[in-house]
Image (tube, rainbow, N blue to C red):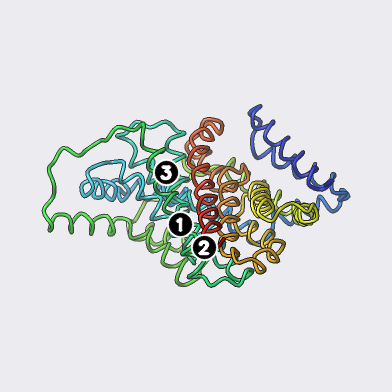
């Protein structure tokens, strides 16, 4: 259990430093060094981990994508596209709360690291009339961004789990469907219960007017949907697709260079870039140290009942990495013997996903969470208070579905 205790110790230090309001980027960089030393990496290996984590081509593209998202959002606001699109959606649904939930859910169809940053500016615009706290905005943007993660086959968690376990994607999506439905219901109940409805003054629209407003919504957000289209269907990296679309907007709207310079200075955030670099460095040290493999092996050798291991292992990996593909790639190979040998194998997978994603949603290493916190300048402690209840409901849904399946197979 020595490896597991080391990982838990690093996690405890991270949580204490967060509590002491040490910058998360500095906390993660320090935790990376501590983790490397605890798992006997020499200074050269730790330095190599920092170098690889910070300068890996994927890391650099993610940082570029993050900064470009901020710049792209500033241009969308400057041209008025953002305001017009939100106004059109509000006119159709009338209740601003519906708009608040729909925007990150639509953006959530794009399964990319830190994708919540795409919807954050739209959520900020849509919530102006609701006078929400930074923590409420953070919760709504982050939560509804992830409601599809359990069931959409475009998400790495779903297809990786299918590949490793041999479970057909259709079966996996079906057994995980209660988790997505609970996520939507939980986000709606806990996210909006203290927010009063803010209805548009005008009456219901005629069908032709509804069509016009929906058309206006899509037309004004066409640059955004073009980014999604290029990323999803042409497999162009988010950094490149945003670059192409942003350049197109600059040329189409003939934005003066002084305005572009002003937007760049006001929108770009070096602290957010450093935070993303710190997350990627921490993950690289995790890989180099073998910490996750050590923990998985130790837990598997403890002889605990399979159901406890199915819950515990994905939860620990999800929380430590903040990366849902990691919880699939590291936990399911260990859990595979239980899954394949049991008539409840499909439901073991569902329970592992419920447990792993629940902890992954609370992880201070989760890029979407930390980026959204930084964007809205929200308190991490107050945001966690909003997250605990709906996360618990998702986990309990997984437990209830598993127990029902267990009862039917007896």
Q: Position of residue 210 (x, y in %)?
A: 17, 55
Task: Indicate whether 219 appears above or below 236.
Answer: above
> Could you tell whether 350 is left or right of 301 in the image?
left
Of the image marks 1 and 3, the number of the one nearer the N terminus? 1
* Residue 51 shows up from this direction: no
Q: Residue at x 61, y 71 (%)?
A: 163
Tell me, yes or no, if residue 310 can be seen here. yes
* Residue drawn at the location 35% of the way across and 44% of the way down: 100
In the picture, the disc for residue 148 is 1
SS at mark 3 in the image: helix
- Identify the image quadrant of residue 48: bottom right
Other residues around mark 2 within 10 Å, as few (<14) / some (14–19) / many (≥20): some
Looking at this view, is 130 or 87 the one in front? 130
Instruction: Residue 176 in the image: state x and y as whole percent.
Output: 49, 59
How many other residues sit within 10 Å of disc 1, few (<14), some (14-19) or many (≥20)? many
Q: What residue would you read off at disc 3?
A: 187
Mark 3 or mark 2: which comes first in sequence?
2
Q: Which mark is residue 322?
A: none
Contact between marks 3 and 2 (CB within 8 A): the answer is no
């Amino acid at each position: 259990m020595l490896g597991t205790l080391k990982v838990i110790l690093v996690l405890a230090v991270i949580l204490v430093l967060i509590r002491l309001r040490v910058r998360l980027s500095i906390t993660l960089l320090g935790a990376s060094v501590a983790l490397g030393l605890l798992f006997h990496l020499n200074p050269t290996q730790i330095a190599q981990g920092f170098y690889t984590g910070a300068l890996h081509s994927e890391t650099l593209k993610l940082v570029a994508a993050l900064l470009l998202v901020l710049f792209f959002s500033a241009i969308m606001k400057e041209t008025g596209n953002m305001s017009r699109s939100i106004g059109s959606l509000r006119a159709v649904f009338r209740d601003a709360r519906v708009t608040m939930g729909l925007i990150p859910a639509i953006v959530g169809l794009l399964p990319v690291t830190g994708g919540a940053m795409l919807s954050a500016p739209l959520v900020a615009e849509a919530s102006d009339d609701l006078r929400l706290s930074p923590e409420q905005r953070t919760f709504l943007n982050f939560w509804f961004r992830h409601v599809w993660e359990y069931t959409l086959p475009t998400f790495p968690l779903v297809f990786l789990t299918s590949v490793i376990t041999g479970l057909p994607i259709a079966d996996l999506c079906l057994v995980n469907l209660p988790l997505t439905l609970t996520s939507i219901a939980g986000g709606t109940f806990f996210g909006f219960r203290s927010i009063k409805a803010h209805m548009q003054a005008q009456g219901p629209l005629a069908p032709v007017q509804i069509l016009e407003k929906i058309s206006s919504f899509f037309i004004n957000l066409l640059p955004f949907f073009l980014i999604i289209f290029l990323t999803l269907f042409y497999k162009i990296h988010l950094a490149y697709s945003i670059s192409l679309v942003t350049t197109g907007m600059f040329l189409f709207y003939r934005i003066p260079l002084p305005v572009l310079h002003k937007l760049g200075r006001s929108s770009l955030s070096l602290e957010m870039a450093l935070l993303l670099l710190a997350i990627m460095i921490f993950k690289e040290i995790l890989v180099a140290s073998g910490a996750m493999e050590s923990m998985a092996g130790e837990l598997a050798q403890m002889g605990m009942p399979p159901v406890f291991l199915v819950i515990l292992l994905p939860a620990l990996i999800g929380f430590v990495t903040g990366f849902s593909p990691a919880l699939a790639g590291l936990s399911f190979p260990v859990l595979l013997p239980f899954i394949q040998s049991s008539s409840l194998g499909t439901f073991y997978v569902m329970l592992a996903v419920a447990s792993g994603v629940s902890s992954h949603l609370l992880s201070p290493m989760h890029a979407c969470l930390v980026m959204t916190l930084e964007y809205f300048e929200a308190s991490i402690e107050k945001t966690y208070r909003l997250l605990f209840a709906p996360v618990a409901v998702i986990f309990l849904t997984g437990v209830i579905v598993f127990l029902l399946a267990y009862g039917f197979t007896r």
